[in-house]
Image (cartoon, rainbow, N blue to C red):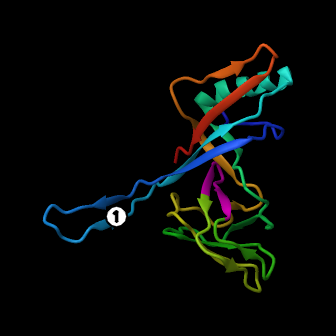
Amino acid sequence: MPVIEMPRWAVPNGASPSFMDFGAILRPSTGAEVLRVDRLGSRYKARLSFPPFDDVDQGRVIVSRLIRAKRAGLRIEYPLMCPQPLQDAVVDGAGQAGTTLNIRGLTSGMVVREGFWLNVVRSTGQHFLHNVGGEVIADGSGRVALPLSEMLRRPFVDGDKVKLVQPMIEGLVDGDEQAWSLSIERFVGIEFTVEEAA
């Protein structure tokens, strides 16, 4: 079953993103230096809330998709505080690892700012959310080495899509149950948490 996508008109009015760090701090019992160990797999989750849907049909659609997303997974736009004045690009070279992602396809001189969000999209369509860890400028051929705030979780292939305009968060709907509220005014209130699965 393909991952469930929320309709474009379903725009959250609140979000509480969080970073799930799978690294660790080692504190030796001997009093030696404390050591930070980074591990692959650190990723994101976001608790999203929506304004009450006063259109009963819209509320019904959201509830239906949310129930199905418990099994199939969910993809929804990651809430940005302001637009990212960029363009989408592609991965430049296969087998990359670590905290740098080489991309191509940008306009020469385009600035990618620290704190911007992006997706790397595998050929399967799975979206991986990443945060830009420093400001960089595309060279004359539209290439840039993007510093990332966290390590790449997959070895992407050359030409995989990089979404810089409107990144998504894709994963599992968290929790053993999903609830929504119905008011006597016929409004439908919805909140849920989506957590990246890989």
Judged from the image, the secondary structure of the residue bearing numbered disc 1 is strand
Does residue 196 appear in this view? Answer: yes
Q: Is residue 179 magenta?
A: no
Q: Amino acid at mark 1?
A: Val
Residue on which the image places disc 1: 37
Estimate the x, y position of residue 156 in percent, counting from the top left.
58, 61
Q: Is residue 83 left or right of residue 27?
A: right
Q: Position of residue 6 (x, y in %)?
A: 75, 36
Query: Which residue is more in the foreground, 142 or 113?
Result: 113
Q: Position of residue 163 (x, y in %)?
A: 72, 59
Residue under the point 77% across and 33% down: 51
Would you identify the image quadrant in which residue 114 lies? bottom right
Q: Nearer the viewer, residue 11 or 154?
A: 11
- Camera sees residue 160: no
* Residue under the image location 81 percent in, 67 percent down: 85
Q: Residue at x 73, y 62 (%)?
A: 164
Q: From which residue to which does the magenta span run? A: 116-129
